[in-house]
Image (cartoon, rainbow, N blue to C red):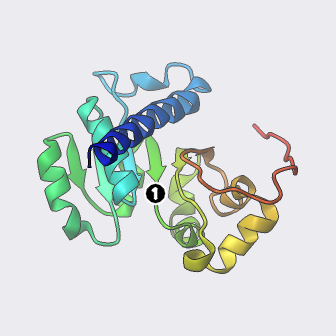
Amino acid sequence: MEKRLLLDGSRRALLTAGGVLALNSALQTRPGFSQTNSNGKLRIGVIGSGRIGGTIGGLWVKAGHPVVFSSRHPEELKDLVTGLGSLAQVDSVTWAIGSGDVLFVAVPYGAIPQIGRDYGEAMKGKIVLDACNAVPARDGSVAEEVEREGIGITSEKYLPNTRLVRAFSLTRSSRAKRTAPIRN
């Protein structure tokens, strides 16, 4: 039991550090971006507020950032938001995208094509932290596409015109030797 508690704490620390590093690296390319609010805090929209989205979003709230949590079942997020206080709110995906300076996407990878179709125009130009991982048993043909093309290229295909940052990637591709050009 003690060993499990230690691992859970280590995982939380790793997620926290990863979230901070991903957000910082995304913002490095936009000088002065963190001054969007009068208090210097970013407005963050979270799409998919389960284990990863809820945890990372909660850490951002605790750090003082206003966060809009969204999911397919927003009524299930009431306890999460109530426990986080006034900087956290639940709303639609549309509202999370519109109100966020930065978006954090943490959904099953199979949902990425639909998110791109439904919300691509609204996400245009936004910094999008993509924490989704393709799992063949769950995500079907899009997971096969990830295996062939690579997850970064596939995410960019479905979320075009965003400032895409891959974060918390657990996907291992057999095509690791393939490289893609970096585009600005």
Judge left or right: residue 88 versus residue 60.
left
- Residue 171 x/y as whole percent: 64, 57
Mark 1 closeness class: few <14, some 14–19, many ≥20 residues within 10 Å:
many
Task: Name the residue carrying label 1.
Answer: 106
Determine whether the residue tagged by mark 1 lies in a helix, strand or loop: loop
In the rendered structure, which amino acid carries the disc numbered 1?
Ala
**Point 63% across, 75% down: residue:** 136
Picture layout, residue 47 above or below residue 39: below
Residue sitting nearer the eye, 175 or 155: 175
- Residue 71 x/y as whole percent: 34, 65
Q: Quadrant of residue 17?
A: top left
Q: Quadrant of residue 78?
A: bottom left
- Residue 82 x/y as whole percent: 12, 51
Residue sitting nearer the eye, 25 or 95: 25
- Residue 98 x/y as whole percent: 40, 51
**Point 58% across, 65% down: residue:** 116
Picture layout, residue 2 above or below residue 97: above
Residue 96 appearing in the image: no
**Point 85% across, 43% down: residue:** 181
Residue 134 appearing in the image: yes
Picture layout, residue 42 above or below residue 149: above
Image label count: 1
Judge left or right: residue 155 versus residue 42.
right
**Point 53% across, 46% down: residue:** 129
Residue sitting nearer the eye, 112 or 151: 151
Q: Quadrant of the C terminus?
A: top right
